[in-house]
Image (cartoon, rainbow, N blue to C red):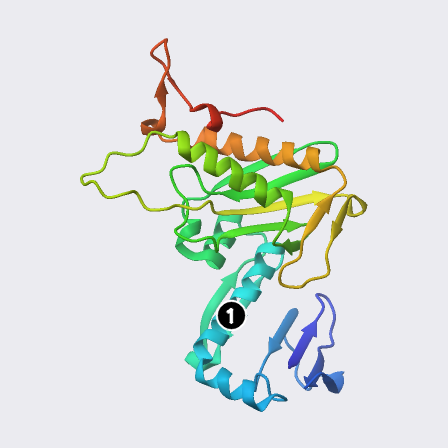
């Protein structure tokens, strides 16, 4: 593992080399670089020969897994630019995000086509701020891989935030008028897709220590859930296609009950 980094405004580039968990060197780099940090990984699993052999046999999957890990970091920190270069594919750039780019652009770079239809959502209260992207009720994903929640910049896999969105999605989708079909096949299963950021007082949330499947418990969970509901329902209300509207007794189109906006 080789890390080269230079702070903006600094003249010196520093270089650190680690092998098998042991630092081999930490010194000024022989050549300067642009402001930022470059991380280079070679000989993956070099200290575990059997696993290294298995990794070489599935090189493409290992690179894709590394790319996905960096994509999560990019989603968590949209104010930082990220670039992933795959040397096994001739130096091909497999991920690139730009600091300060619109949330939709970062999501598209990290998640691909599933992010194309996602819409912005936001809500705030005295204790919490919610912002990010969510698939409209007319969209969604064929898998559950595009469901991400970040709490104060930390990716979490288990929280009241994700559970709330999934529950809302199932109830709202069940009440929507299905689009017309030319055949009698059952409609495909569609899952919610979302990238939601929760910002709150660090003392008001407990984050578990797991790296891959961290969980979050909020001291004021009701406030967080209310903010999530308000943000998502408002986004759905603003982006519901006319064909999904129901006719009211007055003849005007209205949203199904579970998809209506409810103020938090």
228 w.r.t. 113: above or below: above
47 w.r.t. 236: above or below: below
- Residue 102 seen from this side: no
| Residue 43 position within the rendered picture, expressed as x and y whole percent measured from the top left | 56, 87
Q: Is residue 211 left or right of residue 135?
A: right
Q: Is residue 97 left or right of residue 187?
A: right
| Residue 225 position within the rendered picture, expressed as x and y whole percent measured from the top left | 64, 36
Q: Is residue 102 left or right of residue 204?
A: left
Q: Nearer the viewer, residue 256 or 7?
A: 256
Q: Nearer the viewer, residue 183 or 107?
A: 183
Q: Which residue is mark 1?
A: 65
| Residue shown at the point (50%, 82%) measured from the top left | 55
| Residue shown at the point (46%, 44%) measured from the top left | 192
| Residue shown at the point (71%, 77%) measured from the top left | 13
Tally of numbered tags: 1
| Residue 263 position within the rendered picture, expressed as x and y whole percent measured from the top left | 59, 24
- Residue 53 seen from this side: yes
| Residue shown at the point (74%, 86%) measured from the top left | 22
**Residue at the bottom extreme, as displayed:** 49
88 w.r.t. 260: above or below: below
Give the quadrant of residue 81: bottom right
Which quadrant, please, contains the C terminus?
Answer: top right
Q: Nearer the viewer, residue 219 or 111?
A: 219
SS state under label 1: helix
């Amino acid at each position: 593992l080789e890390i080269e980094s230079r702070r903006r405004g600094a003249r010196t580039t520093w270089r650190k080399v680690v092998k098998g968990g042991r630092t081999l060197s930490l010194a000024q780099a022989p050549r300067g670089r642009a402001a930022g940090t470059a991380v280079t990984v070679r000989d993956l699993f070099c200290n575990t020969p059997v696993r290294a052999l298995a990794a070489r046999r599935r090189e493409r999957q290992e690179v894709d897994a590394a790319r996905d890990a960096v994509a999560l970091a990019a989603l968590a920190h949209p104010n930082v630019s990220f670039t992933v270069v795959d040397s096994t594919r001739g130096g091909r750039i497999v991920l690139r995000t730009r600091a300060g780019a619109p949330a939709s652009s970062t999501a598209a770079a990290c998640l691909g086509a599933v992010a194309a239809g996602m819409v912005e959502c936001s809500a705030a209260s005295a204790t919490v701020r919610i912002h990010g992207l969510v698939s409209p009720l007319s969209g969604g994903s064929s898998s559950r891989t595009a469901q991400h929640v970040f709490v104060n910049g930390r990716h979490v896999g288990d929280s009241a935030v994700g559970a709330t969105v999934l529950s809302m999605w199932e109830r709202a989708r069940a009440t929507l008028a299905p689009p017309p079909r030319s055949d009698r096949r059952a409609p495909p299963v569609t899952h919610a897709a979302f990238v939601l950021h929760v910002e709150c007082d660090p003392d008001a949330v407990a984050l578990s220590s797991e790296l891959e499947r961290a969980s979050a418990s909020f001291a004021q969970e009701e406030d967080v859930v209310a903010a999530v509901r308000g943000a998502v329902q408002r986004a759905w209300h603003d982006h519901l296609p006319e064909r999904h509207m129901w006719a009211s007794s007055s003849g005007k189109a209205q949203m199904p009950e579970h998809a209506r906006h409810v103020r938090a």
